[in-house]
Amino acid sequence: MEDRHFLISDVDNTLLGDDDALVQFAAWYENLDERPHLAYCSGRFYASVCRSIETTALPVPDVIIGGVGTEIHLVESGTRVAGWPENAASWERDAIEAVLVGHKELERQPDELQSDFKLSFYGRDLEPAFLAHLERQLTALGHRVEIVYSSNRDLDVLPPKTNKGYAAAFLARCCKAEPHQVIVCGDSGNDLSMFQQGFRGVVVGNAHQELRALSEENIYHSVHHFAAGVLDGVQYWLNGDSRGGSESGAMIDSRSLDG
């Protein structure tokens, strides 16, 4: 099998945010002799990310992970990967939503930002103690969930073991990519889980404190913002990568992801 890297990047305020920097990133990526597989991992849903690809200089990716990791689509075919989320059977959406709406600290986001596997609320400056209480309350009622809080505002409640990081790990596992071959990029708290999978990380210069606080050796902090930071960090890892030859980098298709 070919030995190729996998680049998995957040979209808003990571690749998007500086048009000139994005053009430079796209030119670099498109002119590579051997391009890494490319996936976008966004809080937005598939159709919304596709609109950004059509209206900006974003390169066309192989995969789009959307809805804070609750959906995975193959871009060439437009098909959604079956079997993800892996823990959907235990997800009792309506009962969980009933608990959430009972908290005055939370304001339900518009319907277009909700999905079968994503409950989204606004909650300004929520304290860690409140988030821990919320998780304990749901657990006591028999609901196992993932709680993702980012930008001191956005609260997403997802099925267990479902978020951007778990989705990225699922994608890497299906494509037989080793952790050192996967580079993840992000700017905010809903990207944090991607940096907890043992992958190589790139934190862009405009990142929120949730990511700026990371200090692991496998995480590169760029001083550059938006796509310029992504390009800086990805080049850092690719130019410094002396490993190779492992049996990985399988082609992305529905068989590898659905199997």
Image (spheres, helix red, strand yellow):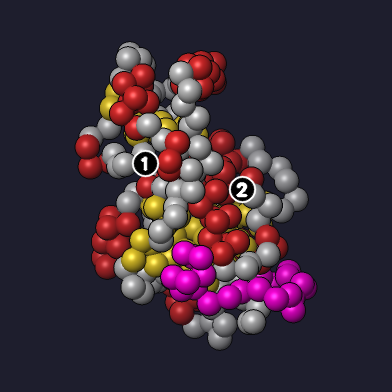
Considering the whole magenta stretch, tell me its main secondary structure.
loop
Where disc 1 sits, the SS reads loop
Q: Amino acid at mark 1?
A: Phe
Q: Is residue 211 left or right of residue 12?
A: right
Where disc 2 sits, the SS reads helix
Q: Residue at x 34, y 32 (%)?
A: 93
Contact between labelled residues 2 and 1, with CB atoms less than 8 Å apart: no
Up-down relation of residue 150 to residue 244 (above or below): above
Q: Amino acid at mark 2?
A: Phe
* Residue 121 percent across, percent down from the top left: 34, 29
First of labels 1, 2 by sequence position? 1
Q: Does residue 207 appear in the picture of this structure?
A: no
* Residue 248 percent across, percent down from the top left: 66, 73
Quadrant of res 55 = bottom left
Outermost residue, right side:
242
Q: Residue 50 versus residue 186: which sits nearer the camera?
A: 50
* Residue 258: in magenta span: yes
* Residue 246: in magenta span: yes
Circle 1 residue: 117
Circle 2 residue: 195
Report the Cα–Cα distance between label 1 and label 2.
Answer: 22 Å
Q: Residue at x 49, y 83 (%)?
A: 31
- Which stretch is magenta? 235-259
Q: Does residue 256 appear in the picture of this structure?
A: yes
* Residue 33 percent across, percent down from the top left: 56, 86
* Residue 35 percent across, percent down from the top left: 54, 78
Q: Residue 210 versus residue 109: which sits nearer the camera?
A: 109
